[in-house]
């Protein structure tokens, strides 16, 4: 398979501290790849190495099958974590300038920008100065600047930062549509609910090291279905101290019970039914957030 991005065993060290250590990932066309991890895990450092802003001390990074060079950057859209907009410029003038830097003619840039401004529901703000916009609005402007030149590889560092739920949903829909067009999307985040909805593959990084990587569906199937959702009447106080229960979130008439790996979910349900009135139960796979907490916790142990 031809990968848009191949990161092979890269490391970045500052004195005795490894910001990234031995990290590998591969992202193919038509996929959404989530680079996950807590704050300070090494996600942004990894992205900066991909973009040639930082150079790895070890390992290799290939973009479209070859080492990064300036000509390849026109095929990449990069949204950094820190906003890099000129505060005194008007939105449209700035976007037009940035699109031409990526190789678009003025006429083609204007056409693309009009399309994206309409799609991002931002046309009425195009003649405002950036400094007049909220953080969420500035994030939308920066996203338009990232994709206006129609890149094949789109790298988004915390793309949902500052967005309200409506605009976050709008951006999710756009990312999915870009995937359908055959684009490769790599995005960094710590918002697990968006990863579950969007990503085909994930790489979970902690302390600069890859601790979990692969197709999201396969990763979730590796974990036992040991979370039980209950709708009930009565009291679950008898579960406190039960050795089969790892965690109990009791909301009165609904509860989420996370069992230990050794517990049998069916035996547990039979025991609960004998003590309270159960109206509904469901055995579910753990959420990505649960997996994230478990894996990061293990790496800190």
Image: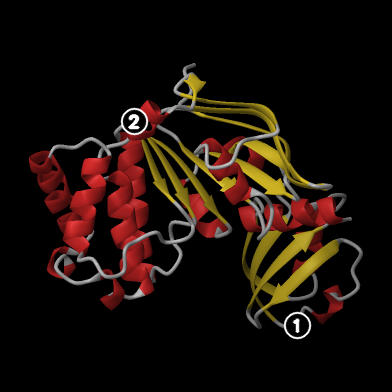
Q: Is residue 144 left or right of residue 57?
A: left
Q: Is residue 43 left or right of residue 109?
A: right
Residue 23 shows up from this direction: yes
Quadrant for residue 189, please give it: bottom right
Q: Is residue 264 left or right of residue 133?
A: right
- Identify the element where label 1 is drawn: loop
On residue 235, which mark appears?
1
Asked whether 239 or 232 is in front, the reply is 239
Residue drawn at the location 48% of the way across and 27% of the way down: 68
Q: Residue furthest top?
A: 1
List the residue tagged with mark 2: 182
Q: Position of residue 242 (x, y in %)?
A: 89, 69
Residue drawn at the location 79% of the way across and 69% of the way down: 274
Looking at the rendered image, the quarter that the C terminus falls into is bottom right
- Identify the element where label 2 is drawn: loop
Spatial distance from mark 1 to mark 2, Cα to Cα? 52 Å
Quadrant for residue 133, please give it: bottom left
Q: Residues within 10 Å of mark 1 (few under 14, many from 20)?
A: few
Label located before the other in sequence (1 or 2) = 2
Residue 266 shows up from this direction: no
Query: Is 217 rendered above or below residue 295?
Result: above
Quadrant for residue 92, please give it: bottom left
Q: Position of residue 86 (x, y in %)?
A: 31, 63
Instruction: Kindly check if marks 1 and 2 are in contact, taking CB atoms under 8 A apart as contact.
Output: no
Q: Position of residue 44 (x, y in %)?
A: 58, 50
Residue drawn at the location 33% of the way across and 48% of the way down: 146
Asked whether 164 or 256 is in front, the reply is 164
Q: Nearer the viewer, mark 1 or mark 2?
A: 2
Q: Is residue 183 left or right of residue 5?
A: left
């Amino acid at each position: 398979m031809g990968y848009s991005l191949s990161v092979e065993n890269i490391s970045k060290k500052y004195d005795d501290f490894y910001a990234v250590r031995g990290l590998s990932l591969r992202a193919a066309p038509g996929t959404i790849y989530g680079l996950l991890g807590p704050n300070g895990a090494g996600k942004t450092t990894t992205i900066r190495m991909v973009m040639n802003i930082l150079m790895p001390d070890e390992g290799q990074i290939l973009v479209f099958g070859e080492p990064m060079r300036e000509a390849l950057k026109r095929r990449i859209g990069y949204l950094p974590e820190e906003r890099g907009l000129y505060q005194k410029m008007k939105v449209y003038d700035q976007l037009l300038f940035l699109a031409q830097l990526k190789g678009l003619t003025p006429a083609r840039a204007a056409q693309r920008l009009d399309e994206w401004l309409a799609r991002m529901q931002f046309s009425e703000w195009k003649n405002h100065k950036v400094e007049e916009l909220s953080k969420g609005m500035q994030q939308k402007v920066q996203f338009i600047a990232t994709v206006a030149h129609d890149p094949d590889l789109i790298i988004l560092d915390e793309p949902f930062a500052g967005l309200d739920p409506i605009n976050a949903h709008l951006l999710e829909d756009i990312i999915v549509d870009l995937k359908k067009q055959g684009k490769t999307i790599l995005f960094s985040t710590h918002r697990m609910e968006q990863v579950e909805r969007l990503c085909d593959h994930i790489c979970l990084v902690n302390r600069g090291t890859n601790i979990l990587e692969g197709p999201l569906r396969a990763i979730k199937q590796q974990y036992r279905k040991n979370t039980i959702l209950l709708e009930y009447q009565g009291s679950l106080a008898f579960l406190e101290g039960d050795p089969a229960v790892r965690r109990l979130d009791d909301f009165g008439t609904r509860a989420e019970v996370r069992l230990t790996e050794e517990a049998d979910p069916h035996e547990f349900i039979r025991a609960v039914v004998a003590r309270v009135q159960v109206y509904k139960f469901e055995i579910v796979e753990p959420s990505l957030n649960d997996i994230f907490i478990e894996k990061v916790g293990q790496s800190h142990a």
